[in-house]
């Protein structure tokens, strides 16, 4: 296993992305919906940060704002010193669905971000990534010919092909079966350890958050606020069998109690 470039994150690591007093109100015909309220987070260089909370607490709203796809009502988001108000070349996003275009084969789906940017595809990097995720030889297959897990692997390749420094992941494995989800969690952990990317990952699964994260940001019910931030000091690499250990299960139960507003 290569050195865990992003595995050790502490106060000495520089802040990669800074969210300050982020608030969001959606205006609808039936009135305003207060999605986020005064959220502030410092995301550090090379960190694997998980956002966890009940449905409707504003996790996706926050992530989309970090991607420059949603504007905030109040507050700011910065990448280094640069305000994020529009999509940024250093930031890539992986959605809940793979969102592969059905009329394009896998290779042309992966090349799409380069076409949008009017750049030549980095074929060497794409080939390396395809080998890394086990999709070498599937370049000419169409999405309908790929399993759900393979489609999400292709989505990861498409996002990493442009070599972003920040990867935003909006519950990307939620629709997969348990076995495939374990495989994908191992894969993204390995890719993160190999590349040192900064990853912000949304999940509804407490166990998934504990398995993947350096820190877990627990959000309250709408309007979303920061309820707690939890350090996860488990050693890496983390094997799947870790999820059955007493220490792991105790951590999961403690966070569940926190979300349920019960004493742990």
Image (tube, grey):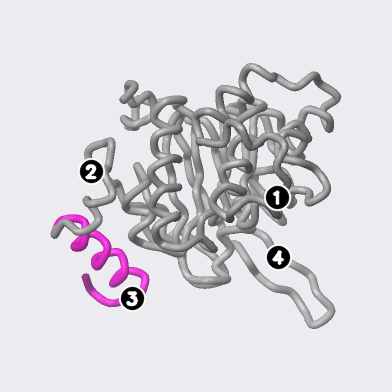
Whether pointer 2 and pointer 4 mark residues with C-beta atoms closer than 8 Å, the reply is no
> What element does badge 3 sit on?
loop
Choose mark 2 or mark 1, whichever is in front: 1
Which sits earlier in the primary sequence, circle 3 or circle 2? 2
> What element does badge 4 sit on?
strand
Which sits earlier in the primary sequence, circle 2 or circle 1? 1
Report the residue marked by disc 4: 25
> What element does badge 2 sit on?
loop
* Residue most extreme to the left: 246
Report the residue marked by disc 2: 234
Residue 262 lies within the magenta run = yes
Residue drawn at x 51%, y 60% is 176
> What element does badge 1 sit on?
helix
Report the residue marked by disc 1: 143
Q: Is residue 68 above or below residue 128?
A: below
Instruction: Give the percent coordinates (x, y) of residue 28.
Output: 80, 74
For the residues labelled 4 and 3, the Cα–Cα distance comes to 25 Å
Whether pointer 1 and pointer 3 mark residues with C-beta atoms closer than 8 Å, the reply is no
Answer left or right for 240 relative to 13.
left
Q: Quadrant of residue 111?
A: top right
Choose mark 3 or mark 2, whichever is in front: 2
For the residues labelled 1 and 3, the Cα–Cα distance comes to 42 Å
Q: Please state the extent of the stretch shown in magenta in the rendering.
A: 247-264
For the residues labelled 2 and 1, the Cα–Cα distance comes to 36 Å
Q: Nearest the camera: 9 or 156?
A: 156
In the rendered structure, find residue 202 and report the number of the disc placed on it.
Answer: none
10 Å crowding of disc 4: few (<14), some (14-19), many (20+): some
């Amino acid at each position: 296993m290569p050195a865990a470039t992003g595995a050790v994150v502490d106060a000495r690591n520089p802040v990669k992305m800074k969210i300050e007093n982020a608030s969001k109100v959606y205006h609808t015909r039936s009135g305003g919906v207060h999605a986020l309220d005064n959220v502030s987070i410092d995301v550090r260089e090379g960190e694997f940060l998980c956002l966890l909370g009940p449905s409707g607490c504003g996790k996706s709203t926050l992530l989309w704002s970090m991607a420059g796809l949603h504007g905030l009502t109040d507050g700011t988001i910065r990448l280094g010193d640069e305000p994020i108000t529009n999509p940024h070349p250093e930031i890539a996003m992986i959605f809940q669905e793979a969102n592969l275009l059905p009329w394009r084969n896998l290779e042309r789906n992966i090349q799409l971000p380069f076409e949008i940017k009017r750049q030549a595809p980095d074929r060497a990097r794409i080939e390396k990534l395809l080998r890394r995720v086990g999709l070498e030889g599937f370049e000419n297959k169409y999405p309908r010919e790929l399993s759900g897990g393979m489609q999400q692997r292709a989505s990861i390749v498409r996002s990493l092909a442009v070599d972003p420094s920040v990867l935003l992941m909006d519950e990307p494995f939620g629709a997969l079966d348990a076995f495939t989800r374990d495989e994908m969690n191992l894969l993204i952990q390995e890719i993160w350890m190999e590349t040192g990317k900064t990853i912000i990952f949304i999940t509804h699964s407490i166990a998934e958050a504990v398995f993947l994260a350096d820190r877990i940001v627990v959000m309250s019910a709408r309007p979303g606020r920061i309820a707690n931030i939890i350090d996860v000091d488990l050693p890496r690499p983390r094997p799947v069998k870790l999820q059955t250990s007493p220490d792991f299960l105790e951590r999961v139960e403690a966070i569940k109690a926190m979300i349920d507003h019960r004493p742990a």
